[in-house]
């Protein structure tokens, strides 16, 4: 879309801007060609109107040859050549006009006086054309930077979106339903335990709700969330699973995005332990080294477990996307499954209180 | 009708969570006509109990260790009344496709449970068995689209074998059964060969004959046999007949 031609009011403004140019040209023609005021104005007004439209065409060549894509020499070469051609055509127009005026006996000997102004016309034509080229390049640069800004904005919105989606998906409704079912079982057999489970479940939910608004939390806080989650699952699975933790003291103080590890532990329980008749274990290791926080969640699983008819791996995918959106290349995410053990290893920058260390 | 009433409904509860079984047990306790003959916590045991105790009604969890609820149903057949019990509502449609009596979503209350039990009793009272279609075929139709079979559960008496499809050499139709050949052994399964064919990944398995499906990875060569038929020779030396249509399909596959 042409920035000026596409809007009528812009075109009007643009043509208005040409009126002082026409006046200036008339003055130059009068001085150098010895034309009368009337002659000079009758020539310069139609000529400027024509040239205003010729200069509009510079937009297309500017767009075709982006300023960043070629050398200055090449740009000059192309546009000066174009300016000379445009200017030459313009002079032809001027001569035609002068001829017509003479033939119509409006002005006598105008063609002679015009020939004296040709160098001025040529110079003005080239300068005006090159000026519009510069104008369009500036316009294009502004447009490009606006576009880049819009893109960056879009990327930010997308990252934020991904994060929100991830958070929403992370409190697994099935965990909730199964827990409620356990509570419903306990109400008649062991009322005290049912109450305990309600409290634990409430505790876990409250923690997850509060976390959504924070951008990072200390690992220690994420761990206590995991403990709240496991306390509920322990009642469901009884003696079927063990949790081992091996977390460096320093790592506990580091910042992690909230609900980053809980889905990994939940995954380990629902896809790993839940499928093992004899039960199994989940282990969480975390340590800090050279400014990198590495965390490994490992669990036992049954390689011969029934294939999931449910879309699984959503939890894993969310964790990976969140890491990527937030830390990009400064994070890593690896999944390994072999010999009845499933492990997810992640690394992220070791930061404390929002600052790198 | 009377004899039906006198007889107790033999019931089995299958769920990997003790507390989940407890709820069902409790809700069944006011019903003298129900006799809980067994409980178990995984798919293998479910198949075993179903074969030994011959229950009329099974409360079946879907996600369990070893075999999931649909696989269990595939192995024990559809003569029994099945009530699926699960926290996953996305299975509901498939549960009815495999002719389950009802589908209980955890957590459920007494009223909903009673309704399911009532439906089960009606189903058991009606003389005709609910499905003349083999369970395996139903299970195959209930498979989500664009997802092919990864493993085939087979039952021999009370024992369950899991055959990963990568280990299946070929399948042969034998009346109402298919014989699945894997690692030199044959396992019989009640399923028409056509329903097995659609459940298998067509880029890995091909119907080369009215009675045969072959694992394409196992085919060593195809030789002419007789006037216008062919013979597929597998890596382990087994020879399988290839029909004319089967040969065309095989050619189309090899030319790709």
Image (cartoon, coloured by chain):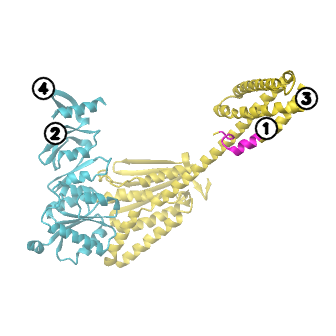
Whichever of labels 2 and 4 marks the residue nearer the N terminus, that label is 2
Q: Which mark is residue B210?
A: 2
- Give the magenta range: A2-15
Distance from Cα at disc 2 to Cα at disc 3 = 102 Å
Is disc 1 on the same chain as disc 2?
A: no
Is disc 1 on the same chain as disc 3?
A: yes
Question: Among the chains, which one is yellow?
Answer: A
Q: Is residue A319 above or below residue A20?
A: below
Badge 4 sits on which subunit?
Answer: B
Residue at 80 percent of width and 34 percent of height: A45
Where disc 1 sits, the SS reads helix
Specify few, some or many for label 4: CA neighbours under 10 Å numbering under 14, 14-19, or 20 or more: few
Question: Among the chains, which one is cyan?
Answer: B
Q: Is residue A292 visible?
A: no
Q: Which mark is residue A18?
A: 1
Badge 2 sits on which subunit?
Answer: B
Whichever of labels 3 and 1 marks the residue nearer the N terminus, that label is 1
Q: Which mark is residue A87?
A: none
| Residue underneath mark 3 | A31
Q: Is residue A190 above or below residue B218?
A: below
Q: Residue furthest left?
A: B3
* For the residues bearing labels 3 and 1, Cβ distance under 8 angstroms: no
Is disc 3 on the same chain as disc 2?
A: no
| Residue underneath mark 4 | B227
Distance from Cα at disc 2 to Cα at disc 1 = 86 Å
Distance from Cα at disc 2 to Cα at disc 4 = 18 Å
Q: Is residue B100 covered in magenta?
A: no
Please tell me whether mark 4 or mark 3 is closer to you in this view.
Answer: 3
Please tell me whether mark 4 or mark 1 is closer to you in this view.
Answer: 1
Residue B206 located left or right of residue A124: left
> Residue A77 lies in what quarter of the image?
top right
């Amino acid at each position: 879309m042409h920035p000026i031609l596409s809007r009528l009011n812009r075109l009007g403004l643009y043509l208005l801007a040409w009126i002082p140019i026409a006046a200036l040209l008339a003055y130059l023609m009068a001085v150098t060609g010895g034309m009368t005021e009337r002659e000079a104005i009758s020539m310069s007004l139609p000529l400027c109107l024509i040239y205003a439209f010729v200069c509009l065409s510079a937009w297309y060549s500017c767009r075709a040859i982006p300023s960043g894509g070629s050398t200055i020499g090449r740009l000059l070469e192309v546009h000066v050549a174009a300016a000379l051609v445009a200017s030459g055509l313009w002079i032809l127009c001027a001569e035609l006009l002068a001829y017509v005026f003479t033939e119509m006996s409006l002005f006598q000997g105008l063609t002679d006086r015009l020939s004296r102004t040709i160098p001025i016309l040529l110079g003005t034509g080239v300068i005006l054309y090159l000026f519009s080229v510069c104008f369009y390049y500036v316009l294009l640069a502004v447009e490009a930077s606006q576009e880049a800004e819009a893109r960056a904005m879009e990327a930010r919105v997308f990252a934020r979106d991904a994060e929100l989606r991830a958070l929403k998906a992370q409190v697994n409704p099935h965990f909730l339903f199964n827990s409620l079912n356990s509570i419903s079982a306990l109400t008649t057999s062991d009322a005290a335990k049912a109450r305990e489970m309600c409290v634990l479940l409430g505790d876990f939910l409250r923690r997850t709700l509060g976390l959504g608004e924070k951008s990072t939390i200390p690992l220690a806080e994420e761990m206590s969330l995991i403990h709240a989650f496991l306390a509920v699952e322990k009642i469901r699975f009884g003696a079927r699973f063990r949790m081992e933790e091996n977390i460096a003291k320093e790592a506990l103080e580091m910042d992690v995005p909230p609900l980053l590890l809980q889905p990994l532990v939940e995954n380990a329980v629902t896809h790993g332990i839940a499928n093992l008749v004899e039960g199994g274990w989940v282990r969480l290791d975390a340590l800090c080294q050279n400014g990198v926080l590495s965390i490994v969640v490992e669990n036992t699983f049954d390689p011969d477990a029934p294939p999931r008819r449910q879309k699984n791996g959503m939890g894993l995918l969310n964790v990976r996307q969140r890491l990527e959106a937030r830390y990009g290349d400064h994070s890593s995410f690896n999944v390994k499954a072999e010999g009845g053990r499933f492990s997810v290893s992640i690394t992220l920058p070791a930061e404390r209180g929002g600052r790198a260390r | 009708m009377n004899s039906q009433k006198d007889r107790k409904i033999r019931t089995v509860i299958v769920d990997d969570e003790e507390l989940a079984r407890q709820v069902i047990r409790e809700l069944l306790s006011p019903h003298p006509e129900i006799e809980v003959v067994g409980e178990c916590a995984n798919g293998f045991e479910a198949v075993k109990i179903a074969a030994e105790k011959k229950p009329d009604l099974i409360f079946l969890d879907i996600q369990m260790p070893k075999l999931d609820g649909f696989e269990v149903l595939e192995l024990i057949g559809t003569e029994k009344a099945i009530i699926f019990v699960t926290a996953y509502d996305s299975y509901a449609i498939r549960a009815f496709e495999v002719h389950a009596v009802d589908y209980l979503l955890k957590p459920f209350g007494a009223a909903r449970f009673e309704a399911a039990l009532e439906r089960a009793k009606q189903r058991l009272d009606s003389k005709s068995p609910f499905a003349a279609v083999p369970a395996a075929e139903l299970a195959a139709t209930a498979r989500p689209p664009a997802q092919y079979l990864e493993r085939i559960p087979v039952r021999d008496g009370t024992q369950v074998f899991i055959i990963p499809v990568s280990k299946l050499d070929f399948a042969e139709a034998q009346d109402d059964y298919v014989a699945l050949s894997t690692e030199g052994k044959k396992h019989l399964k009640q399923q028409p060969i056509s329903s097995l064919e659609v459940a298998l990944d067509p880029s890995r398995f091909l119907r080369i004959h009215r009675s045969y499906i072959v694992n394409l990875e196992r085919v060593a060569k195809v030789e002419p046999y007789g006037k216008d038929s062919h013979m597929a020779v597998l890596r382990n030396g087994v020879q399988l007949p290839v029909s004319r249509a089967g040969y065309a399909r095989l050619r189309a596959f090899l030319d790709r």
